[in-house]
Image (tube, rainbow, N blue to C red):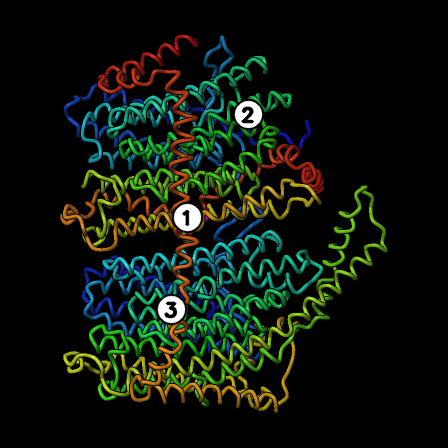
Amino acid sequence: MDTQVSVLLPIIVLLPLLGGLWNGLFGSRTSRQTVYVVGSLTVLTSFVLSAMVFWHLRLAVNVNPDAAFRYELYHWIAAGSYSFDMAFLADPLSAIMLLVVTGVGFLVHLYSTAYMNDDPGYARYFAYLNLFVFSMLTLVLGKNLAMLFIGWEGVGACSYLLIGFWFKDMDKAEAGQKAFVVNRIGDIGFVVAIFLLLAFANGSVDYDSLRAHFSDSRHVLDDPNTITAICLLLFVGACGKSAQIPLYVWLPDAMAGPTPVSALIHAATMVTAGVYMIARLNFLFVLSPHAMTVVMIVGAITAVMAASIGLVQNDIKKVLAYSTVSQLGYMFIAVGAGAFAAGVFHLFTHAFFKACLFLGAGAVIHGLHHEQDIRKMGGLHAKMPVVRWTFLLSCIAIAGLPPLAGFFSKDAILAETVALKPDVERLEKYYEHGFERRAQYLAFAEKKDGEAPDEKAIAAKTKEIKEKYVASVEKLAPLRKVAFGLGLLAALMTAFYMFRLYFMTFHGQYRGDHHTWDHAHDAPWQMGLPLMILAGLAVVSGWLGMPFGGGKFNLWDKWLEPVLARSHDLVEGHLTPAVEYGLMGLSVLVAATGVGLAWSWYGKGPSTQAAGLATSLKPVHNALLGKYYIDELYDTIVIRPLRAVSQFLFHLVDRALIDLLAVRGPGYALLGVSQLGSLLQDGNVQVYLLGMVAGLAMLAWYLI
Amino acid sequence: MDSSMAQNWLQVTSTSAFPLLTLLCLVPSLFAVAALFLPGDQPWAHKANSLVGSLVTAALSLVIFSRVDTSHAGLQVVDKFNWIPSLHANWFLAIDGLSLPLVLLTTFLTPLVFIGAWSAIDKRWKEFSIALLVLETGMLGSLLAIDLLTFYLFWEIMLVPMYLMIGIWGGKDRVYATVKFFLYTMFGSVLMLVGILYLYQKSGGSFALPDLVKLTLTDKEQVWLFGAFALAFLIKVPLFPLHTWLPDAHTEAPTPGSVILAGVMLKLGTYGLLRFAIPLFPGAMGKFSPLLLTLAVTGIVFGALMAYVQTDVKRLVAYSSVSHLGFVVLGIVIFNQESLQGAMLQMINHGLSTGALFLLVGFLYERRHTREISDFGGIAKRMPVYASFFVFVTMSSIALPLTNGFVGEFLIFAGTFKEGMHSAIEPGKFNWRMWVQVLGGISTAGIVLGAVYMLSMVRRVFFGEIKNAANESLSDLTLREKLIVGTLSVAILWIGIYPAPFLQLSDATIKAMSAPNRLQIQQVRSPIDYRREMQQGLAQ
């Protein structure tokens, strides 16, 4: 039975690839309908098969909690002591991702059949979109980090192609390139981490063997600093893909792509890959509370910073883009705090409400002839009831108001951020050998005479190192409160800017031109149906993780338990029900405040109060509008210098120093180049060939 | 000498009753001779003749491939007979895991280059086909020769047609480029010849590599001789700062010349290091490792930065070669199995991807007679198929997973970091570990810089609105052109998706070759690791 189910895994992955290849190679010669059917049906089939895998996994997990489906296609690379397989793994974590990717993927395909109907490049679009789904499935279903990396770079390439889909617009092509290059910067961290893991963990980056490796401290790699370094390098990769500080700058620009692409790639799936990666490697990250804290704090700062920029943006997609960056920050707060299940939970719920918001925005843009400025919208509830209601539900969900999805996932993150803490005693035990070895090394290095240091000195040194380590871990605790505070602040801002967006778009008076208003229309069914399904999920998906009753009704945590078991050994902590309900109340209060503020300032269109506030806080408002001028900063400190240095090196070092001075100088002097040159220039080829043959003959004669 | 250091990989394991390898080398030249008798004013006759010649060569190389047992190291299908008795010089050709992939690459690329030349070369087809066929003989002979004199003969044969190709069919500054290429390579060749003669004299009269590796040389001799050989090979690679002939040669050479130059000839430099320079003088290799490592990594970064500021597409690709070949040298200098496998594969990869890039640039040049980036812009609209191929090959050039470039680069990096992490820590010393860690870290910048310069170029050439009216009438690829790049694309994907058969080609040889040589290299560059690795070797 299990083997039969396992066979589905490569099929799930390869179907969209086949669809993509078909549409890429023949799509321009077939009808639109064929392209649509091939593109959507392959993903729909993958979704159905994924659901089957999920169902069977559920049955299997009931019998054996560690059940998972594995399928090995072939040995991909083998060299020296390293080897990598093309192999797939469906465990509870990847099964969830599988459903999200194929499910939202299909809805976006369906939506696109209407959205892209006027575009001459529809075949290319659907080919790219299918290739993206293929890459994303490789990413989540891969059984090892090498497979994850194939998908990781694959989605990056598809993202590059789709952001620059309308390549005739140079700005869009540039946005695509920026996304690729910034992601590549992060990828350096990711691959170096893979190389380090390979070097330390027996030449395999298979999840199963890595997990086994890192659950036993007798293996090598028991030095906390090395593990911290590896985790931080992995996080650099995650920062690139999941748009965290300092590598988030590509995501807002990525809105240049068609809106359904933003929904699928830049909201629901690809950008969450970093969160998935850290959750996947939870057994590694929990070994480094320091790296986890960095993840948590970077996530928290990103959440607030992006949310603050979102407060003032006027482009409907830009608001959603910064909102995505901010929500991704939330997910990193979670995984950094050790609340892996909550982080993935927020990933899950966010996929639905954010995809719904983007698709809704797309429907608005589509209905208004490519208008994206919310200052020229307003009152659209009358024209677009379906879009309006689904958008409203998603706004409530993201704002974190009960009983919609965002409330549960956000609340779980905030609660666990303060509740959890690393189990220092167990960590200490894990690193026992490492401390001792480090002590030996240091004691040896201190003794200049090369003699072996005595036992007592080593013991003392070990103790010292251990105490230092424990102290440094304990020093991290207050930062959880900081992250919690920033998380609350971000929640407040989120509620505000989302409802600002909603009110500006759908309420008040219409502020655009009348021709557009007359032609404004609600979404056709291909767009409306996905919106309704996603809005429905935005309402109910949170109920999987009910926080009440001491976790008794929390299906979510229970489902992910086998994947996260190791992390629960090393991170612990519970809240009393009173505190838990208190926090819940607090986050509802915060969200309601945000919504209320938005209502009072924008409920009937932009108010004078809001404008007045903007003028009185001009410098702040400008900084927010200018996105803190980070793009300009990078341009000044990275891009321009790189070009200038390259030019300088080219002219001075390559041309002048090496070529002219070192190479041509002596050459001119020695050989009288001009003569030789003129000889070659207008000679007869036959003569050269003759000379060549003659020379060879002479050489042969001489030798024999 | 220690038995663990014996160069078993140079033992003859199979001979051929029929001189297959000699025939392989000669077939292209036989067709070149045939071309002499074909009328010079009938280009089609020469097109047909050269295509048949290169296809027959390719078929023969496949026959030879079927005779090679890749699961064992050692010299196979050996052709060896007394050549110049007065000098004790043998005609000694053999094939093994080092040469096999490159031989196949050569015979695979040459027919494609000929087909590509149908439109790229518009004058003197007779002479062109003769030059390129002789060049193929030279390349195959250089790859197959085990005897140093035989090797040197082919090495020189290879250079002459290349001078002619750049000098006659080249662009407007072809003379300058030819002279530069000539001086550079002659300089290296002459030094190598001196080295060969010294070894000949020292060994008491042998040019055969298996004899010469048994010589005991003093440290000083090793350093000087390694210097002579390595310089010849590193100029050919070319390693920074010996690279300045390459951009000129590439820019001026006609498309077929560039493809062969980048596709095969540059690899003869890295191949020569692996085949001759390192096995002959491993101690010196150990001594020079930090220097070569520094130059390789400098080349990776420097080549990429240079490519970034080029305004001519072909020159940009030429500088990208400097960067990519830096990766190959990095893999060779690190010298563990992973990095060597990566370097070996990356030689093939660079031949395919950069070969494809030069062909693609050539297709555009034939249409517009310019290669300036600023003359283009927005042409993806007019040439969608061309643009798709170009972006695809770009992705392989910047090592996207599931293309060939990724597998090679990944293995080179993996080997480098393994070396950095597994080498011994010596408190307070800047040792080999530090060298590898620092420079390995810097080399990863190539991952980003490659994307920067390639994608910038692609964007400026293909995307945006068409601004230059001359580009409005551009026609997309013809069937012939699609066939050429299509074939290369299949190879690119095959290696990326299923590299096992390609890695298998050189696996056994690299294992057998790296073991003894690595120990001797380590003995010099990192004695502390040498002792550990010796013990591990003895324990097995």
Q: Numbered disc 2: what chain?
A: B
Q: Residue at x 51, y 57 (%)?
A: A190
Q: Earlier in the sequence, mark 3 or mark 1?
A: 3
Residue shown at the point (43%, 61%) measured from the top left: A151
Q: Quadrant of residue A404?
A: bottom left
The disc labelled 2 sits on which kind of residue?
A: Phe
Q: CA distance from mark 3 to mark 2?
A: 54 Å
Say few, some or many: other residues with alpha carbon within 10 Å of mark 2 (under 14 / 14 to 19 / 20 or more).
many
Q: Chain of mark 1?
A: A
Whether residue A135 is visible, yes or no, is no
Q: What chain does badge 3 belong to?
A: A
Q: Nearer the viewer, mark 3 or mark 2?
A: 3
Above or below: residue B441 compared with residue A46: above
In this figure, which residue is indicated by the disc labeled 2?
A: B226
Q: Nearer the viewer, mark 2 or mark 1?
A: 1
Please count the marks in the image.
3
| Residues at marks 2 and 1, CA–CA distance in whole angstroms | 36 Å
Q: Amino acid at mark 1?
A: Leu
Numbered range of the magenta stretch: B403-408
Q: Amino acid at mark 3?
A: His
Which secondary structure is most common in the magenta stretch?
Answer: helix
Label 1 Cα neighbours within 10 Å, binned few <14 / some 14-19 / many ≥20: some
- Residue A525, magenta (yes or no): no
Give left or right: position of A85 versus A366. right
| Helix, strand or loop for disc 2 | helix
* The disc label shown at residue A266, or none: 3
Tell me if residue B404 is in the magenta stretch: yes
Q: Is residue A299 visible?
A: yes
| Image position, residue A610 (x, y; %) | 35, 83
Local SS, label 1? helix
- In the image shown, does A670 or A567 lie closer to the viewer? A670
Q: Which residue is mark 1?
A: A642
